[in-house]
Structure formats: C-alpha cells, structure tokens
Image (spheres, rainbow, N blue to C red):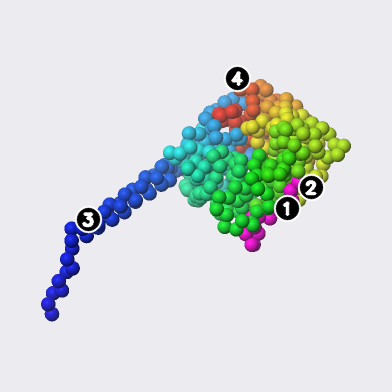
C-alpha cells in the first residue's frame, strides 16, 4: 500500500497556527501576571510560637517590650499564641517577644484583617482590594501562616471585618456577607449586582449599612433604606434557609429621623442584641431616658429595655466592642461600658476611660489616661492601677491580653507591655 500524501499546508495555515500559539501564550502570561499567586509572598513559620498559658496574676508594673505598625486594625488581633499586625499589604504574626513567626504579603491594598475563630479553627483572615472592591479574601493558618482558603466576590471599597464564634462578617456601606470557617458564604445582603433569585432578601431597597455584628447564628444590622425616615435595626440568620432565602428574625425602627449619628451594634447573641444609641434623636422607649444609652432587643428586634450611660452622640469611629471571657466592653467616647456577654445587660461603666479592655487572671483591665485600671469583673470595683507611659497618645486605646502580655492598640501602633 502506498504512502498517504499529507495535506498541503499553505503559508496562511502556518501564520494562523502561529498566531493561535502566541495568543495562548499571551493569555497564559496575562493570567499569571495578574494572579494573586504572583502578587503574593508567604514566609511560613520555621517553628511554632511558644504556647501561651493564661496569666496567673496581673502585674503591678509593666514596660514596653516591642511595638509595630498596624494601621488596618482597630483592636489588637490575637491568635492562640501570636499577635497579628496588618499594614502596607503585609500581615505578620509575632510571638509575645515581638519576633516574626510568619508573614504574608500581597502587592495590593490591605482593607482589613482579623484573627479567630475562638474555640474553633485558629485562623487569620486578610482582605485585599481589587477592581471589585475589598473582595479578595485569604484565610491563613495561625500556626504557620499557610494558606488554607480563599474567596472573592463583589464588595464595597471600604469594609469592616469581624469574626464571631461561628461566622465571619464583612460589611461596607451597601452590602454584607457572612462566611463559615471554610469561607463558604452564608448570606449576602444589600447591594447584589446580579441576583440569581431577586426574592431571597427582605423587601427593602437601597439600604445603607451603618453597623453590623455577628454572634451565634445571628447578624444584627443598623441600616437606613428607601422610605425609612430614621435608622432601622434588622436581625438576620447568619446562614440561608433550605430554599436559599435570608431569614429575617425581626426589624424595627430605632429612630424617627436621621438627624444624628447612627446607633452602633455592640453585642449580638442568640438571646439579645445590644445597641449603643448616642441620643441625638430622643425617640426610644416612651417615658424612657433621653441621651446616650444602651438599648436591648430580642433576636426578633423587640425592645426589652434601655440603660443610660455616659457617651458622645456618636460612638467614636475606631471604637469596637471586645468580647472576652463572659464580658463585653465598649468605649462610648466618655466611658467604657461593661456588659454581660450572655444577656447584653450593662454591669457597670468606667468614667474617663480611653478604650475597651480585656480580662486577665479573672480581673478586667481598662485603659485610662496614664494607667491601666484593674477592676473586679462582677461589680467594677477598682483593685489597683498599673502605671503606663503612652507618651503623647491620649486615646483611643484598645486593650487585649495574650498570656502574661498586655497588648494595646494605640491609633495605628500596636504596643506589647509586660
């Protein structure tokens, strides 16, 4: 049998083939050039950070052991054994002596960073900005910095990130999302550019989100939507229903106007929602107090009471609640209010404090001008004070504890005291 003669190849065929090959190579290079892998760099831990056991006593004196910039965080972010800083696109885990345990960096603006989950996965979340807003999310193992999850979706250009006991929450002025520890989305609420099912959310439109917090399986939101004259409190489930809808537990108007600053969510549990209301709009419980107060609601957004506190009309922008060992502390601008973490009820307030505090060896540490006030958790009685030289820093200062080290966030700087 004779040899089959090959098909004749023309010059045009060769040119087209070459162009296709070039196009494929260019596309591959473009994908690689713009990929997060090329823009990121991980320096993993060579050995784990020393295990941090709870402190047995509160020190009477402390000194600065180390400090680092962390302008993306408002509250010190701690894992089981490390302190996390976030600045200039870089997330770094430090041991309590300030040494680098691991570091993750990307050539993109860093929007937010947070450490969690308490009692669950020991992780750090980092959120970076791209052309879809603050939408690039990476989950890092707190032990060694290894990447063990990533997600991307539409997001606002400015966001707040927090981690509750079961869910992480990312929200901006127009939308929010919740994720589980595996970064699988629970709900998205607010602006959705391409809704698959337009009937999954409550029938409110063009809502602006002012405050949000997740706790247990709830998400509490302060918002203002079309046709709302004032600010609204809405409570949702952190996850979708079986038919992929958002379950709304309740929604109620907090104020009758938006003349003043929006109220702030400071606690969300499966039994209670606590809201700081600066009192710019005196609307509240009929016959109730006028002025700054903590207002309590059920998960169905039904009012159960309110407690007057010292505070500014609007909570300071960088003020965030700290939930630690059964108590929640929140700085109102004039005082630190301490609440029962299980039911949201205020226990006491510390006048003239400069930020929220944390529990160390069974006592509450609250930052004060020039000192740290050490108080009994159950009634606020001051046991003693720890002198602290903060230089020109007057506040706000957020305080957390890791082992026998006290960590303060002073503006854009993180300071370790021991």
Q: CA distance from mark 2 to mark 1?
A: 10 Å
Q: Give the position of the N terminus as an image quadrant.
A: bottom left
Q: Secondary structure at mark 2?
A: loop
Comparing labels 3 and 1, the label whose residue is closer to the camera: 3
In this figure, which residue is indicated by the disc labeled 4? 392
Question: Is 137 a magenta residue?
Answer: no
Say whether residue 38 is left or right of residue 397.
Answer: left
Question: Do tag 3 and tag 4 residues touch (Cβ < 8 Å)?
Answer: no
**Residue of label 3:** 15
Badge 4: how crowded within 10 Å, few (<14), some, or many (20+)? few
- 3 or 4: tag closer to the N-terminus: 3
Mark-to-mark CA distance, 4 and 1: 46 Å
Q: CA distance from mark 3 to mark 1?
A: 64 Å
Residue at horizontal 70%, vertical 31%?
314
Label 4 to label 2: alpha-carbon separation: 44 Å
Q: Secondary structure at mark 1?
A: strand
Q: How many marks?
A: 4
Residue 249 is marked as: 1
Q: In the rendered structure, which disc, 3 or 1, sits on the residue that comes first in sequence?
A: 3
User: In the image, which is nearer the foreground, mark 4 or mark 2?
Assistant: 2
Q: Position of residue 247 (x, y in %)?
A: 68, 55
Question: Does residue 214 lie above or below 59 as drawn?
Answer: below
Query: For the view shown, which residue lies furthest in the right direction?
Result: 287
Instruction: In the rendered structure, find residue 302 and report the number of the disc placed on it.
Output: 2
Describe the element under mark 4 as helix, strand or loop.
Answer: loop
Of callouts 2 and 1, which one flags the residue occurring earlier in the amino acid sequence?
1
Residue at 52% x, 36% y is 86
């Amino acid at each position: 049998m004779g040899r089959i003669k090959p098909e004749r190849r023309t010059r045009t065929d060769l040119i087209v083939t070459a162009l296709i090959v070039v196009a494929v190579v260019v596309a591959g290079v473009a994908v690689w050039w713009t990929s997060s892998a090329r823009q990121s760099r991980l320096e993993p831990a060579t050995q784990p950070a020393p295990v941090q056991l709870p402190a047995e006593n509160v020190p009477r004196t402390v000194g600065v052991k180390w400090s680092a910039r962390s302008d993306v965080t408002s509250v010190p972010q701690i894992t089981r054994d490390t302190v996390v800083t976030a600045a200039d696109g870089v997330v770094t885990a430090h041991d309590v002596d300030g040494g680098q345990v691991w570091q993750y960096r990307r050539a993109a603006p860093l929007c937010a960073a947070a450490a969690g989950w308490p009692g669950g996965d020991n992780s750090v979340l980092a959120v970076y900005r791209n052309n879809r807003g603050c939408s690039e999310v990476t989950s890092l193992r707190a032990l060694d910095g290894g990447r063990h999850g990533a997600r991307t979706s539409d997001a606002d250009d400015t966001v707040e990130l927090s981690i509750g006991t079961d869910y992480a929450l990312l929200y901006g002025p127009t939308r929010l999302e919740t994720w589980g520890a595996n970064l699988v989305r629970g709900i998205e609420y607010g602006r959705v550019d391409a809704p698959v099912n337009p009937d999954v959310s409550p029938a409110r439109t063009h809502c602006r989100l002012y405050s949000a917090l997740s706790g247990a399986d709830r998400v509490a939101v302060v918002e203002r939507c079309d046709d709302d004259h004032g600010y609204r409190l809405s409570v949702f489930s952190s996850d979708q229903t079986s038919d992929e809808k958002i379950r709304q537990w309740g929604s109620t108007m907090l104020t009758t106007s938006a003349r003043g600053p929006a109220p702030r969510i400071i606690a969300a549990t499966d039994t209670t929602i606590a809201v700081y209301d600066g009192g710019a709009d005196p609307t509240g419980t009929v016959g109730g107090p006028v002025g700054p107060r903590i207002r309590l609601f059920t998960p169905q957004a039904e009012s159960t009471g309110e407690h007057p506190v010292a505070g500014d009309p609007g909570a300071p922008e960088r003020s965030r609640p700290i939930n630690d060992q059964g108590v929640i502390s929140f700085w109102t601008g004039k005082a630190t209010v301490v609440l029962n973490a299980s039911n949201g009820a205020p226990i006491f307030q510390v006048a003239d404090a400069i930020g929220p505090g944390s529990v160390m060896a069974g006592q509450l540490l609250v930052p004060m001008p020039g000192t740290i006030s050490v108080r009994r958790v159950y009634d606020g009685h001051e046991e003693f004070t720890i002198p602290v030289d903060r230089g020109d820093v007057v506040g706000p200062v957020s305080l957390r504890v890791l082992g026998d080290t006290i960590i303060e966030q002073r503006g854009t700087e993180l300071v370790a005291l021991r």
